């Protein structure tokens, strides 16, 4: 079978860099263009020295890429820039996996409120598939535009969705306490990511205001009643990984057995979800596309607790994007994503 | 004023080591004995090389210390060992600050259930003061035996107690999601504290079963109705520090202003509590006795959220123990605890 | 082409674990047995939870493996245990890559002095190939037994050998200051690898006595005059990686151009060596089989300085072992080793 | 005794911040002014949140400080800015401890070459005392201007000076391989100090060109023949600390006993130098003013090796500056510097 042709728009950030790593080893893909506006003309390894001697790609401006010759384009661009690009090229001449937040929320109104910006092409929002294969595989397979999920939402929606859909928890009782590694804050040095500040440290941020809050609520609402979620993100002194705890009040009749049956039903056959009998650990998913999930019912408090772990650059970004690309192009869903976690 | 005479029983763990650091600089204390059964006869700096050239103390067995010549004894021993010692020396010939869990729970029955051991001297439990000066200062001042609080309970009770006492939250709705540095797991190497396992990693442990759960519930119950608390501890890849989030359903009438008034009333004059307008950070309390507290009301979800930060070896153990010693001996409460946080 | 059959003896340490990761993705290998004496009978993922759902291998005792049905056996065993095994099975019924130190030193006398043990089968030492393909590729291709190099020696010999062979440095002037991540100390928790001791810390160890000293000297001596090397290892607070500085007095006539020509000649076509124009960084080789090398001539001091970086579990152990296996079995030398570094 | 009056110019960097920590607990000092041009008018704790509730100081511009009312001024300013200030206020109306590099080199010509800038007030250079009390105590006591040593030079000169002065090593054979924590790179976020780049990483920088090279050479030259030093700095993934290895060829007659006698003679009575029998560790000096030194003679290679450890913000900057201030003002040399290392 001939390889599909792929391009990455915005290759200097961590998401772009991780896409490069994955596509380099992907058996069914030919990477034909990598773009950067600021670094156009430079060799790829000047920006990413870990790729020295691995590629002879030169970065080019996005405008120079002939989209009609590409099967799938990854947009690893900031939000707003993504939707401007999509608008400009509408109708899209190739399949697009957008890694920004611009097409993730089914409600344009909610998007405009939480992102504080006018949507550029609201009519396209309903057409965009939400790129979480475990829940929306069929729509992704035929989508022209896939909105790749946010990292925190991936870690929260995967454990919560089965509980909400099956009606075993009170949907207004959900607390999501999430902890992310520093790559989640991006590749640009900032005060809170300065090593002496982030190292040997831990804190919360974005309390009550983080944009991933409506993404969690409304995505669950795509398949069920949208819950109200208390979402609190924290910054961990690690490079990669998100560990997310969720706490919900159980509805009558819940037992550990009920939970086990539900998760087996939803995820027993999923290639990238592993059900765990104790708390997941970030190191067990590092550099892999797995989402590890632990769940338990606390009889004493009548709560359902879940803990999930992902690599934020993989299942939380580039890995899930490749999984979506595979589905959109009729490739094996796990192609290019089968290597073992790097542990330790 | 002449200095009080003090001894430390069990100086090889981290709590003992931190007591040594504090008492070394304490203006009103003479350290007359430091004990270790396993390392008796060795110089202190053989066990703690960072103290080389700072002390000529030789470790001795606890049985060799003349308790009648000591004002205050710190018991930095494992639980069970502590209560055996107290029983053997009952009535105590000197003041004792016990850093184990043996005298923290007001209910012997609950102690025996969660610690899975018979209490050796249950009649002394009611006499032991719970060593959290912000809440039990008067009792501590006159106590012969102080049960120094656990690290997680300190980080949870200080932010929660005012809310429960003032009746502004539903007492059965409390979720406590706590994250501790690795020194909290003790000085003995274990699999989960091995650097390649703990570093660049994060996970939960002790779900539903951690002994600090009843300590949080019953301590709040000393001054109010005991709540039901969902307590989940996690292991952070840092040396020192606990950051604890609490989530509770607000009762009618709660506003940000109501919360501010409550915390100002309880803690406005406390020397070791700092009210923060954004999330605390572990680095801002490192090596200090501060407990930094942030609180907020989320109108959207009707929840009260608090975040606290302490150094688990300081306000979570040795620092609070020195604070208690100061109170028990009529010294300035902040003596020996006034140095600035080490940041970065 | 049918896959070669491979077994790993000793799969619970980090070297064994990394071999599992690599062989899992190797296109030309079938992993037929994995052994552990202590954990025989357990599923592989009980020991390595990151491999859950990835394999149905059960650990077995080494004695149960039918060696005649295997193409290559990896011995990831402690030194002494390795040579006992080899002696017992002499003549070997399959190809063996030994990751211990037992067959690395060409001088049995030196081995017995630095390892303080009698060699079990000295007559086999001359037959063992030293498994560094860049320098001994031909011998490896036909070897029955390959002694896989030590991690520090790999990082020191690769940059030094061209300089010594070409006679451009004084061979008694070499200082090797090496820094290793904590996985180099093994998977068993020890005091110096306890997170609170290794984290936020740095120190030297094994001054003047480290067994890798004669390995560096005598390996260079296989192709040239054996130098005298001052070797100082240090423990870095990172999981993976060795960065090694070497300092040597230049002989007359050395210039930067001379050095460039030498390294291009030796390593210009090597698939796993990258010549760098600035200091290598551990993150640029993480989880890859690369050895990155920087070299410079300091006119002011008349010294040649080199800096190399490897992942100690990859080019320093399992990666190089797979490279050797490939050569011994006529496979593509880079098979199973071509994925990009994991950065960040 | 009344307290001396002190001011800090440039309080927003790490050196200024550490001076604040030390002076806060100094028994003989009154801190009367803290300056920042960029943050003038702000409360100190807005810039340094760890100092909340500890001080009511407001930052002011340096020009507003009445220098005639101050005993000692700390200049925690960038080089060039320091000498401009000194020139403008010449003759100095108060004692000055300058923490920049502007007055450290005894040769103006060398300064201008390595710093690539014209010296503003070369006539003052000979008057400036080099602020390393162990070697220049007498001159410091009477100095008006003290050039506080660089962090790397402190870690290298203290172990090397006795060897050079006593003539036991070849002065052109010295290699200094130094490793520093990230606070040494300053408080401003940069690409190489971004957590995902500095964490889990290690590399060299400034090879052959670092300005601390002539500082090491010429400072030793103040008391002896100036050596030629090969100096290579590296960036460690820790917050605080420098560990420095030195390697030198021994002259005839050197033994371990000879070395021991030399170090005892020079440092046996020094309050902040501890001689170690094994490698120092960064954690044993953390947040203290100690310089720990290990030395050994390797008969096999005829080399003298030393390893030193300091906290770069303490003995490498603010701690040594306070030590100098103490000497300049007739205070106890150890005042304000006596607290125990923070370990772990």
Image (tube, coloured by chain):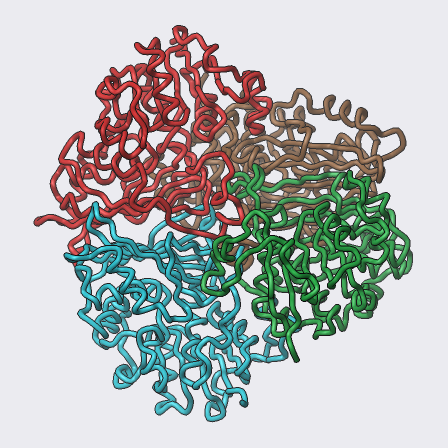
Chain colours: A brown, B green, C red, D cyan
Q: Position of residue A256 (x, y in %)?
A: 79, 28
Residue D265 or residue B182, whichever sits in front: D265
Quarter holding residue C3? top left
- Position of residue A202 relative to residue C124, above or below, is below
Residue D282 or residue C246, whichever sits in front: D282
Q: Position of residue C72 (x, y in %)?
A: 37, 15
- Position of residue A288 relative to residue D337, above or below, is above
Residue A103 or residue C251, whichever sits in front: C251
Please count the marks in the image: 0
Quarter holding residue B340? bottom right
Instruction: Please indicate whether residue B195 sits to the left or right of residue C338 in the image.
Output: right
Q: Position of residue D170 (x, y in %)?
A: 17, 59
Q: Residue furthest left?
A: C252
- Position of residue D140 relative to residue A175, above or below, is below
Instruction: Please indicate whether residue D52 sits to the left or right of residue C23 in the image.
Output: right
Q: Is residue D239 visible?
A: no
Q: Position of residue A73 (x, y in %)?
A: 51, 34
Quarter holding residue C96? top left
Q: Is residue C316 visible?
A: yes
Q: Residue at x 73, y 63 (%)?
A: B94
Residue D274 or residue C174, whichever sits in front: D274
Q: Residue at x 31, y 82 (%)?
A: D128
């Amino acid at each position: 079978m001939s390889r599909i042709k792929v391009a990455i728009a915005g290759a200097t950030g961590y998401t772009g860099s991780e896409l490069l790593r994955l596509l380099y080893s992907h058996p069914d893909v030919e990477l034909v263009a990598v773009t950067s506006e600021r670094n156009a003309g430079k060799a790829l390894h000047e920006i990413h020295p870990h790729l020295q001697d691995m590629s002879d790609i030169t970065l080019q401006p996005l405008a120079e890429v002939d989209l009609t010759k590409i099967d799938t384009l990854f947009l690893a661009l900031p939000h707003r820039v993504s939707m401007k690009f999509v608008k400009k090229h509408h109708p899209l001449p190739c399949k697009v996996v957008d890694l920004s937040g611009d097409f993730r929320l089914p409600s344009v109104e909610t998007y405009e409120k939480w992102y504080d910006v006018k949507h550029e092409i609201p009519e396209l929002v309903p057409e965009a598939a939400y790129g979480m294969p475990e829940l929306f595989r069929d729509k992704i397979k035929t989508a022209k535009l896939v909105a790749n999920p946010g990292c925190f939402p991936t870690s929260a929606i995967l454990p919560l969705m089965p509980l909400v859909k099956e009606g075993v928890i009170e949907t207004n009782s959900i607390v999501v306490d999430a902890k992310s590694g520093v790559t989640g804050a991006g590749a640009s040095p900032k005060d809170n990511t300065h090593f002496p500040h982030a190292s040997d440290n831990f804190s919360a941020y974005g309390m009550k205001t983080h944009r991933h809050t409506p993404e969690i609520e409304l995505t669950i609402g795509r398949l069920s009643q949208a819950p109200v979620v208390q979402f609190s993100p924290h910054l961990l002194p690690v490079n990669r990984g998100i560990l997310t705890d969720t706490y919900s009040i159980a509805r009558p009749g819940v037992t550990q057995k009920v939970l086990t049956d539900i998760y087996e039903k939803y995820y027993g056959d999923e290639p990238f979800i592993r059900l765990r009998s104790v708390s997941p650990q970030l190191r067990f998913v590092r550099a892999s596309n797995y989402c590890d999930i632990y769940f338990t019912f606390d009889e004493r408090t009548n709560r359902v607790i879940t803990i999930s772990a992902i690599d934020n650059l993989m299942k939380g970004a580039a890995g899930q994007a490749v999984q979506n690309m595979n589905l959109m192009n009729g490739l094996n869903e796990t192609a290019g994503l089968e290597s073992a976690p790097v542990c330790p």
